[in-house]
């Protein structure tokens, strides 16, 4: 489980990521110059701001009337002019600083090697100069909240290095504190509007930040060299990097970054390198080592990772799939830890002052995909920052619901920044008030993977109730003469980032009752109803949701046999959009399945065929892996995984779709897709009783004929270890944490278990089934 290379990184796409949730760095590994491009989770452009457009709700009925009367272009104009947020674009996630180390006379290095060890979360560089071996180890510690680098040599007094800090922001100052600490102070200044028009300008004071580097040589000396530290004739040297901003929360930027940055270093006083690295490893491995995967293929391990990616499409290399799976888990641990910000479009790693999409939280697929593997991949703690984001959005989104729609509850649209904007922003994509409803489903997933009534009562239900209050107010009865006259529909509506061509060849976005809306509302109300039943609360509210559900439109099958994306049969063979929002009901939702709704499942299959058989890349390929897995199509699931890795993985395996910037959702979605190929689970409710269905090896490709995995989680509080040979399950062990009932399915065999908490159950299955 290592990424390794025979040369330094030539650019950001080849550098290796480390992180602790708050700090992230991309390590280039140069012999004569090492560069760490560093991010801190809270350094964003802008400042505390209310994005709401006071009075916007007064224009809602006009827009609805125009849509019901098929005047979509006029409705779009009114929405853009009157209902978008103020301003109409959000702020951007920013690079923090660069840590630079210059090594005199190291430009002719030999025997070069660098790696990222996923088992230890440590990056290593090793090379020789004049017969002396130099080694660097770098890691980012969560318990100590610092980046650590140790440089050693095979001979004494051979380490000479100059250390400097730099940043893209003009308003900064570098100075030396004592003889061994380098400090950079800076502030994000005014911002001009970015050329891509997706990042807002800002004319107020921005966040202040501070970076510190402490040098501790073993032997030799460290001295003040102007705006640099100079280490000379050392046997080894330890560098401790700390950084912080003035961000307190989305309403307050009055923090003291110097005090915070200094405190992290002060906490390490007197500690040895061995103690620091052991604390790091103990913390990290407690998460990472919960899941172990072996697809029994080692032939790729002796090939540098960049070359291995290039050959993956033409070779059977199951080990690459296993490496990609664990890399996704490594990235989630590194970019999303309790108490911090949620992983954004680029996780925590960004080098651009104006990243193309602002590196925001995009809530119409991308941030959700970031967390699809959190529960099944046994990293539920890493899910918590997303729940904190939701809690903030309940506050800002409640004001948006009132100001923009005149509704109760809370609403979130398709993009969010650190200032917790919940308003419609950007272009037509902003006309989508379903983001909060989709986010809420992650709380339900967390509950089903670890059924806990206190979590349901205190965290899940309040969010679902507020989201349901908004939707109950937002839904409107379709008028006489419309296709769905008398039914309750969403208006305005659209299917995220896709358009349709109507019957007179007009390209349009706006509609009412798009299919994904119907599916999200179904999940919202059904789960809110179920929660209220389990807790025996809110009888009248529950009945109101049940009555409302009876008036919601149903999903439809269109003229090609496909699941319709819109209220009209507008799907077309030439539409190859990467978004497949209308297929949410199959995955990550569970309203559609081969067993319970075979006609709708076949409609999903036709929709995937209609959307295109070409090789999708990045997150669209990742989503399709899971969709095909739920259709039990192991051939196409594996094909999409190959598309994802060979078509959009950088040399460092981070997801990219040139010419667009890196988006980390493809990595996380790929990990989730692999899980869905190996294990799927579902909660089946019968009144207050629940049985959890667990499917083993539902979409195992022939390329993975031999393998094992330990530590996967299933809904119901179950953890499962299993192995297979010649494509057949040979051994399985189920651990029950909560003592729930379950059915384990494999091929046509079902094992029913009424489990006890804390007990493990060997599963005896017919290998020939």
Image: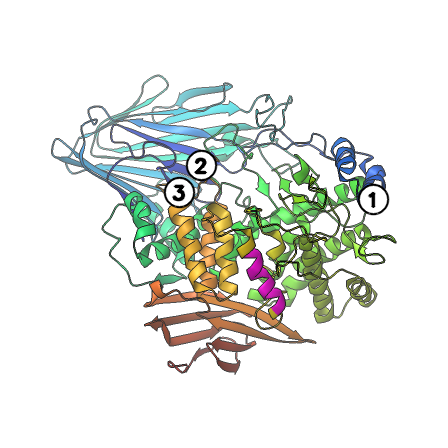
Q: Position of residue 66 (x, y in %)?
A: 82, 41
Q: Earlier in the sequence, mark 2 or mark 1?
A: 1
The residue wearing badge 3 is 18
Q: Position of residue 326 (x, y in %)?
A: 39, 55
Viewer-closest of 544 and 566: 566
The residue wearing badge 1 is 69
Residue displayed at 50% across by 67% down? 680
Q: CA distance from mark 2 to mark 1?
A: 41 Å
Residue 283 appears in the figure: no
* Magenta segment main secondary structure: helix
Residue 658's label in the rendered image is: 2
CB contact under 8 Å: marks 3 and 1: no
**Quadrant showing the C terminus:** bottom left
Q: Nearer the viewer, mark 3 or mark 2?
A: 2
Q: Is residue 253 magenta?
A: no
Residue displayed at 21% across by 26% down? 107
Q: Secondary structure at mark 1?
A: loop
Q: Which quarter of the picture shows residue 392?
A: top right
Above or below, 248 against 703 in this view is above
Viewer-closest of 542 and 419: 542
Q: Position of residue 191 (x, y in %)?
A: 59, 22
Above or below, 193 against 624 in this view is above
Few, some or many C-alpha atoms within 10 Å of disc 2 (few <14, some 14-19, many ≥20)? few
């Amino acid at each position: 489980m290592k990424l390794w290379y025979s040369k330094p990184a030539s650019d950001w796409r080849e550098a290796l990521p480390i992180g602790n949730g708050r700090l992230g760095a991309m390590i280039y590994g140069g012999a004569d110059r090492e560069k760490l491009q560093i991010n801190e989770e809270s350094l964003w452009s802008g400042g505390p701001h209310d994005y709401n457009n006071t009075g916007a709700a007064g224009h809602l009925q006009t827009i609805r009337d125009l849509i019901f009367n098929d005047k979509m272009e006029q409705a779009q104009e009114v929405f853009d002019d009157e209902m978008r947020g103020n301003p109409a674009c959000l702020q951007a996630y920013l690079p923090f600083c660069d840590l630079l180390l210059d090594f005199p006379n190291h430009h002719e290095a030999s025997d070069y090697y660098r790696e990222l060890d996923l088992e230890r979360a440590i990056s290593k560089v090793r090379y020789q100069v004049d017969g002396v071996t130099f080694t660097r180890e770098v890691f980012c510690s969560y318990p100590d909240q610092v980046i650590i680098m140790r440089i050693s040599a095979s001979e004494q007094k051979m380490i000479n290095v100059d250390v400097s800090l730099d940043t893209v922001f003009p308003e900064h100052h570098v100075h030396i504190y004592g003889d061994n600490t380098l400090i950079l102070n800076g502030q994000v200044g005014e911002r001009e509007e970015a050329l891509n028009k997706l990042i807002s300008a800002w004319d107020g004071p921005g966040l202040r930040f501070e970076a510190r580097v402490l040098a501790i040589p073993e032997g030799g000396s460290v001295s003040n060299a102007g705006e640099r530290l100079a280490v000379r004739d050392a046997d080894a040297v330890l560098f401790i990097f700390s950084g912080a901003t003035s961000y307190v929360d989305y309403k307050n930027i009055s923090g003291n970054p110097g005090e915070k940055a200094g405190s992290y270093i002060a906490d390490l006083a007197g500690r040895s390198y061995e103690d620091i690295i052991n604390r790091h490893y103990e913390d990290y491995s407690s998460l990472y080592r919960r899941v172990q995967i072996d697809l029994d293929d080692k032939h790729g391990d002796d090939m540098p990772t960049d070359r291995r990616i290039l050959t993956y499409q033409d070779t059977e290399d199951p080990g690459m799939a296993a490496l990609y799976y664990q890399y996704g888990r490594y990235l989630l641990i590194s970019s999303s830890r309790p108490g911090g910000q949620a992983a954004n479009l680029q996780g925590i790693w960004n080098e651009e002052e104006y990243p193309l999409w602002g590196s925001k939280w995009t809530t119409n697929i991308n941030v959700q995909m970031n967390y699809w593997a959190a529960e099944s991949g046994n990293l539920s703690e890493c899910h918590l920052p997303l729940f904190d984001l939701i809690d903030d959005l309940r506050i800002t989104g409640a004001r948006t619901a009132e100001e923009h729609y005149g509704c109760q509850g809370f609403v979130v649209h398709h993009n969010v920044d650190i200032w917790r904007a919940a308003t419609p922003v950007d272009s037509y994509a902003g006309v989508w008030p379903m983001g909060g409803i989709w986010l809420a489903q992650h709380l339900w997933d967390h509950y089903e993977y670890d059924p806990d009534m206190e979590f349901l009562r205190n965290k899940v239900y309040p969010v679902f109730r507020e989201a349901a209050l908004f939707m109950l107010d937002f839904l409107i009865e379709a008028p006489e003469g419309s296709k769905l006259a008398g039914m309750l529909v969403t208006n305005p509506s659209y299917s995220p980032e896709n358009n349709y061509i109507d019957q007179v060849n007009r390209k349009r976005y706006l509609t009412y009752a798009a299919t994904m809306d119907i599916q999200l509302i179904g999940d919202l109300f059904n789960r809110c109803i179920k929660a209220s039943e389990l807790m025996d609360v809110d009888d009248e509210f529950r009945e109101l949701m049940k009555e409302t559900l009876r008036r919601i439109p149903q999903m439809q099958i269109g003229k090609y046999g496909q699941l319709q994306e819109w209220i009209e049969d507008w799907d077309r063979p030439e539409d190859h959009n990467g978004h497949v929002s209308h297929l949410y009901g199959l995955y990550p939702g569970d309203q559609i399945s081969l067993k319970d709704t075979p006609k709708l499942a076949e409609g999903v299959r036709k929709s995937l065929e209609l959307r295109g058989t070409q090789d999708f890349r990045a997150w669209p390929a990742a989503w399709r892996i899971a969709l095909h897995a739920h259709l039990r199509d192991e051939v196409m699931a594996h094909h999409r995984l190959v598309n994802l890795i060979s078509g959009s993985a950088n040399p460092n395996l981070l997801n990219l779709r040139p010419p667009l910037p890196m988006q980390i959702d493809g990595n996380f979605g790929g990990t989730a897709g692999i899980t869905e190929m190996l294990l799927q689970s579902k909660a089946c409710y019968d009144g207050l009783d629940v049985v959890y269905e667990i499917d083993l090896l539902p979409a195992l490709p022939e390329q993975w004929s031999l393998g094992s995995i330990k530590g996967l989680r299933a809904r119901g509080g179950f953890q499962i270890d299993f192995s297979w040979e010649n494509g057949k399950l040979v051994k399985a062990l189920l651990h029950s944490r909560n003592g729930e009932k379950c059915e384990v399915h494999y091929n046509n065999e079902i094992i029913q278990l009424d489990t006890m908490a804390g007990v493990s159950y060997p599963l005896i299955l017919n290998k020939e089934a």
